[in-house]
Amino acid sequence: MALLPWMLYLFCFTPVEEKGFVPLFDQEGPPKGWSVSAWNDLSQPGPKDAVWSVREGVLTSGKTRGSWLISEKQYDDFILEFEIKLEKLGNSGVALRAPKKGDPAFEGLELQIADLRYNTNAKDDELTGAIYRSLAPTKQVYKPTEWNHVRIELRGSHLKVMLNGELIQDADLSKQEKTAKRHDGTEASPLKDRPRKGHIGFQHLSRDSSPLLIRKARLQELR
């Protein structure tokens, strides 16, 4: 059978790596293989009313503020893609290579995602696309109250982040020696000393308890 033009296009231009992606939230209801933890310490349970659930392909945090949805599985090198939408006082983050103890922002990595109105006094390394308080993004391309497409790639010490199709992080973590201040004022380890393997997750910390929405989340482990 001859290939139709659109079939030929897909065959020639679809990257081989696309075949390795696995959807993260493809079943309705509470996500299987994930647990809910406190926003500042993954060893502690999240609020009783923090109910994360998938409905019609969209993951929502519910309205109770102050939790992480954390994977039971650990990952080292991977590509993570998803779309996220927050309301005007929305605050979220993505845990990367986080241990199951302490705050992912300081014990692992946290990619900050927040509406620019959440903290109008935020420093560059506290804005969307930052590795929280450690590494500022190169630019701000976040779209308030709209769906934003995020692609995170971790290969060894190399971090690459695309937001809405634009490169905002391209860094060698092994060269990042800056220490970050935790919320209690103590200093966390620099990025060069953070774990190279751990859990992934999504945070709900919106100031007005408005929910965050996530869709089309998928992950490819890199070998």
Image: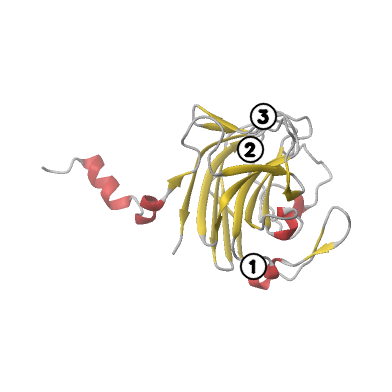
Viewport quadrant of the N terminus: top left
Determine contact: label 1, label 3, CB under 8 Å: no
SS at mark 2 in the image: loop
Q: Quadrant of residue 85?
A: top right
Determine contact: label 3, label 2, CB under 8 Å: no
Which residue is pictured at 68% across the width and 70% down the height? Answer: 192
Report crowding for label 3: few under 14, some 14 to 19, many 20 or more residues within 10 A (C-alpha). Answer: some
Q: Provide residue 141's location: percent of width, then percent of height.
A: 63, 45
Label of residue 143 in the image: 2
Label of residue 99 in the image: none
Report crowding for label 2: few under 14, some 14 to 19, many 20 or more residues within 10 A (C-alpha). Answer: some
Residue bearing the label numbered 3: 62
Q: What distance separates the C-alpha of mark 3 from that of mark 2? A: 21 Å
Viewport quadrant of the C terminus: bottom left
Q: Nearer the viewer, residue 187 or 4?
A: 187
**Discs 3/2, front:** 3
**Discs 2/1, front:** 1
Q: What distance separates the C-alpha of mark 1 from that of mark 3? A: 34 Å
Which residue is pictured at 75% across the width and 58% down the height? Answer: 106
In this rendering, the answer to whether 150 lies above or below 31 is: below
Please name the amino acid that badge 2 sits on.
Lys
Q: Provide residue 57's location: percent of width, then percent of height.
A: 49, 31
Residue bearing the label numbered 1: 173
Q: Provide residue 65's location: percent of width, then percent of height.
A: 75, 34
**Discs 1/3, front:** 3
SS at mark 3 in the image: loop
The numbered mark, 1 or 3, whose residue comes first in the sequence reads: 3
Q: What distance separates the C-alpha of mark 2 from that of mark 1? A: 27 Å
In this rendering, the answer to whether 197 lies above or below 36 is: below
Determine contact: label 2, label 1, CB under 8 Å: no
The numbered mark, 3 or 2, whose residue comes first in the sequence reads: 3
